Image (cartoon, rainbow, N blue to C red):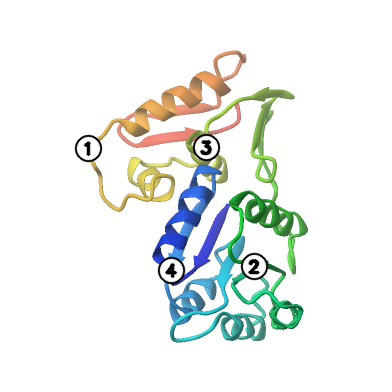
């Protein structure tokens, strides 16, 4: 799942991005309200974490513009303003939840998961399936033929991307950009290592392999013919 963090404090933004990445989310960051509105307007995000006090355009104005444009992406407001009136204003402006700074990351993560379960304003895809392989985006779990499979956060992101593109060849460049957030090839075997580990987990103990190497092109996750 893809999360947009709109936060002007660099340390807080880095802290959030690191924690969310480690929890298996893909994260984009914007450091002011105008950039946040630009990114959020694409509608490509499953949720937004939005600071209230931002340069160029405050968080409530960003929310108002999004809701006026019928963009219903769930939004969690972060703010040092914690009075009842402040929280009410944030929720009435279009926020789906309100968390006062300073906060514990575990609470933020729990609130984010709750927003994603609600799927505010639209149906949110929570499970991906290819043949007998199932990935649950909310519980961050993987099963094949009903059997739990333990995967690391990066393996989860890799599998999610492959499953979203099931039946299609996924190139090395695509994986670097969407799973590792690299916009260049660092000349590393990191992809090969992770694909090999993932293949061992989802295919080794089962009759029909799902993850295939397409020589000279990339990888493809597909159901048996």
Circles 3 and 1: CB atoms closer than 8 Å: no
Does the residue at mark 1 contact the one at mark 2 (Cβ under 8 Å)?
Answer: no
Q: CB atoms at circles 4 and 2 under 8 Å apart?
A: no
N-term mark: 3 or 1: 3
Mark 1 or 4: in front is 4
Q: Which residue is mark 3?
A: 153
How many numbered marks have been drawn onto this rendered protein structure? 4
- Relative to 163, say whether 189 is above or below: above
Label 2, label 3: how far apart the Cα atoms are: 28 Å
Q: Residue 9, labelled with which disc?
A: 4
Nearest to the eye among marks 2 and 3: give it: 2
User: Where's residue 5, x and y in %?
Assistant: 51, 64
Image point (61%, 53%), residue name: 104
**Distance of mark 1 from mark 2, alpha carbons?**
43 Å
Q: Which residue is mark 2?
A: 100
**99 relative to 214, above or below:** below
Q: Which mark is residue 187?
A: 1
Mark 4 vs mark 2, CA separation in Å: 15 Å
């Amino acid at each position: 799942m893809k999360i947009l963090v709109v936060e002007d404090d660099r340390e807080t933004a880095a802290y959030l991005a690191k924690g969310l990445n480690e929890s298996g989310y893909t994260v984009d960051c914007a450091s002011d309200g105008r950039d946040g509105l630009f990114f959020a307007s694409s509608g490509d995000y499953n949720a937004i974490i939005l600071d209230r006090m931002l340069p160029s355009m405050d968080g409530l104005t960003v929310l108002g513009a999004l809701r006026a444009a019928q963009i219903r992406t769930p939004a969690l407001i972060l703010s040092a303003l914690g009075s009842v009136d402040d929280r009410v204003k944030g929720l009435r402006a279009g926020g789906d939840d309100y968390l006062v700074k300073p906060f514990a990351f575990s609470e933020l993560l729990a609130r984010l998961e709750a927003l994603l379960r609600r799927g505010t304003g639209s149906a949110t895809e929570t499970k991906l399936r290819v043949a007998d392989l199932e990935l649950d985006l909310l519980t961050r779990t993987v099963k094949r033929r009903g059997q739990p499979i333990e995967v690391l956060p990066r393996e989860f992101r890799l599998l999610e991307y492959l499953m979203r593109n099931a039946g299609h060849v996924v190139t090395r460049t695509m994986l670097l950009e969407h799973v590792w957030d690299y916009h260049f090839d660092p000349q590393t075997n990191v992809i090969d290592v992770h694909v090999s580990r993932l293949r061992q987990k989802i295919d080794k103990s089962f009759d029909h392999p799902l993850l295939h190497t397409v020589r000279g092109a990339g990888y493809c996750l597909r159901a048996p013919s």
